[in-house]
Image (cartoon, rainbow, N blue to C red):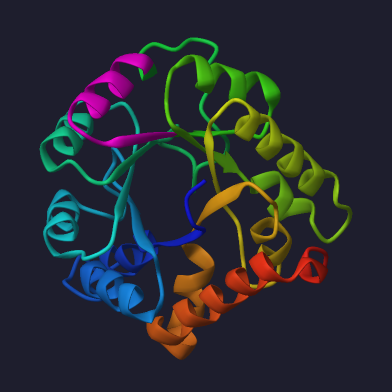
């Protein structure tokens, strides 16, 4: 298994910029600052409706980042083509619906088309492909059949219920164990915050977390450098201290 990694998603820096259709704040500048503050990689989602990140942002990130770049994308032809041209370190396929505020669940792998062709194109271009899926055995086994090296577990249920019970945390733990048994690398993300991240970061077998909105929200108050370093300290402490696994 690879060393544990914290990727910072900088989409919502672009959300603030797009509110005025201006040139600030610059998500590329935020990404470079996040790298210096302790992020192991940068994640950005180029949505079909271009509601936050724009094509030029993705090109600039690919050119200027010094650490691995994880591009989130749906199977839209133009975005897959862009990813194949730019060849980010990792391409994570995610579901999209125009009316959703944010991604609401994992990919439906019951019908692998058009996911399977997109996986093939991205892999042929040299991208490490990951699939964003719900932490369910059927989805994990379907991802394994599609031949990807990695999955990202959707932590949305946990994010909504962690204050009430730990059933969703157990689900994530069991899903991680199954995926590792099948030889898949396991990432996780969605709705993780400074308050709830520690138990997820402590799950044995998860090697990468993708966190965005909470870090960008914190950055509004204290700056991106401090926001990233604080999150990095939290998740790395959880990897070495089992007593931190439950709040």
Query: In this view of the protein, can residue 237 be seen by the observer?
Result: yes
Left or right relative to 211: residue 67: left
Report the magenta residues as a range. Answer: 116-130
Q: Quadrant of residue 164?
A: bottom right
Q: Residue 1 in the image: x percent, y percent?
A: 52, 46
The residue drawn where x is 61% and y is 34% is: 180
Q: Quadrant of residue 119?
A: top left
What secondary structure is the stretch in magenta mostly built from? helix
Q: Residue 110 in the image: x percent, y percent?
A: 55, 12
> Residue farthest to the right?
165
> Residue farthest to the bottom?
222
The residue drawn where x is 25% and y is 73% is: 32
Query: In this view of the protein, can residue 97 be seen by the observer?
Result: no
Check the image and report above or below for 85 versus 39: above
Task: Pick the quarter of the image with the C terminus.
Answer: bottom right
Left or right relative to 88: residue 93: right
The residue drawn where x is 81% and y is 44% is: 170
43 within the magenta span: no
Left or right relative to 209: residue 122: left
The residue drawn where x is 32% and y is 37% is: 128
Q: Quadrant of residue 72?
A: top left
The total of numbered circles placed on residues is 0
Q: Residue 138 in the image: x percent, y percent?
A: 66, 18
Check the image and report above or below for 24 versus 172: below
Q: Residue 16 in the image: x percent, y percent?
A: 34, 69
In front here: 84 or 100?
84
């Amino acid at each position: 298994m690879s060393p544990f990694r914290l990727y910072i998603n900088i989409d919502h820096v672009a959300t603030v910029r797009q509110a005025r259709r201006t040139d600030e704040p610059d998500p590329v500048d935020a990404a470079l600052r996040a790298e210096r503050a302790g992020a192991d990689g940068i994640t950005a989602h180029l949505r079909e409706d271009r509601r936050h990140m724009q094509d030029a942002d993705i090109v600039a990130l690919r050119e200027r980042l010094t650490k691995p770049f994880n591009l989130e994308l749906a199977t839209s032809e133009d975005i897959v083509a862009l990813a194949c041209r730019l060849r980010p370190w990792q391409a994570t396929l995610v579901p999209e619906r125009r009316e959703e505020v944010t991604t609401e669940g994992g990919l439906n792998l019951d019908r692998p088309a058009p996911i399977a062709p997109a996986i093939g194109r991205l892999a042929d271009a040299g991208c490490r492909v990951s699939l964003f899926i719900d932490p369910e055995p059927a989805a994990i086994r379907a991802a394994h059949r599609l031949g990807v090296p990695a999955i990202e577990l959707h932590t949305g249920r946990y994010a909504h219920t962690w204050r009430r019970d730990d059933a969703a945390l157990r689900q994530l733990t069991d899903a991680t164990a199954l995926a590792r048994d099948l030889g898949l690398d396991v990432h996780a993300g969605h709705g993780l915050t400074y308050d709830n991240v520690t138990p997820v970061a402590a799950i044995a077998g998860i090697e990468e977390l993708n966190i965005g909105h909470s870090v960008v929200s914190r950055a509004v108050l204290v700056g991106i450098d401090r926001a990233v370093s604080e999150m990095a300290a939290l998740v790395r402490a959880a990897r070495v201290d089992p007593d931190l696994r439950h709040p």
